Image (cartoon, helix red, strand yellow):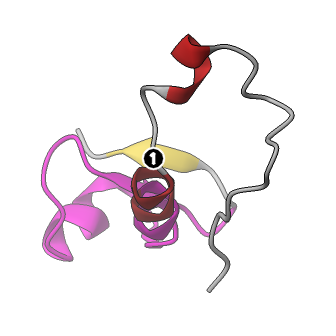
Amino acid sequence: MVKFYPVSPDPYLNKDTDMAPAKFGHLNALLANIRREFSDNATAIAGGLKQGELYSTPTGEVRIVK
């Protein structure tokens, strides 16, 4: 599994406000969620996902369960 790893110094973190919202654990969780593959919403729900959760389709689209 590919994960995000911090780089020091990070070229995208230039101000204190750039560093506050996201943590690498959050990004890794997001990445794990979009690696769940379902063909459509009905299949995702049948697979146990809840409304608002992320998944990807076999074509690579990232979708939100509705």
Residue plotted at (69% across, 62% down): 59
Residue 30: image quadrant is bottom left
Taking the image as shown, residue 50 lies to the left or right of residue 44, namely: left
The image quadrant where one finds the C terminus is top left
Q: Which residue is mark 1?
A: 23
Is residue 56 rendered magenta in the image? yes
Image coords of residue 43 (percent x, y): 28, 68
Residue found 13% across the figure and 55% down from its top: 50
Circle 1: element type: loop
Disc tally is: 1
User: Which image quadrant: the N terminus?
Assistant: bottom right
Q: Give left or right: position of 8 versus 43.
A: right
- The relative height of residue 16 versus residue 45 in the rendered view (above or below) is above
Instruction: Tell me: 50 left or right of 61.
Output: left
Question: Badge 1, how many Cα within 10 Å: few under 14, some, many 20+?
Answer: few
Question: Is 24 positioned to the left or the right of 7 in the image?
Answer: left
Residue at the image point whose x is 46% and y is 66% from the top = 39
Image position, residue 53 (x, y; %): 26, 50
Question: Quadrant location of residue 25?
Answer: bottom left
Q: Amino acid at mark 1?
A: Lys
Residue situated furthest right in the rendering: 11
Q: Point out the residue furthest to the bottom here.
A: 1
> Does 26 sit above or below residue 18?
below
Q: Is residue 48 magenta?
A: yes
Residue 8 locus on image (x, y percent): 79, 51
Q: Which residues are magenta?
A: 30-59
Percent across and percent down for residue 64 are: 36, 42
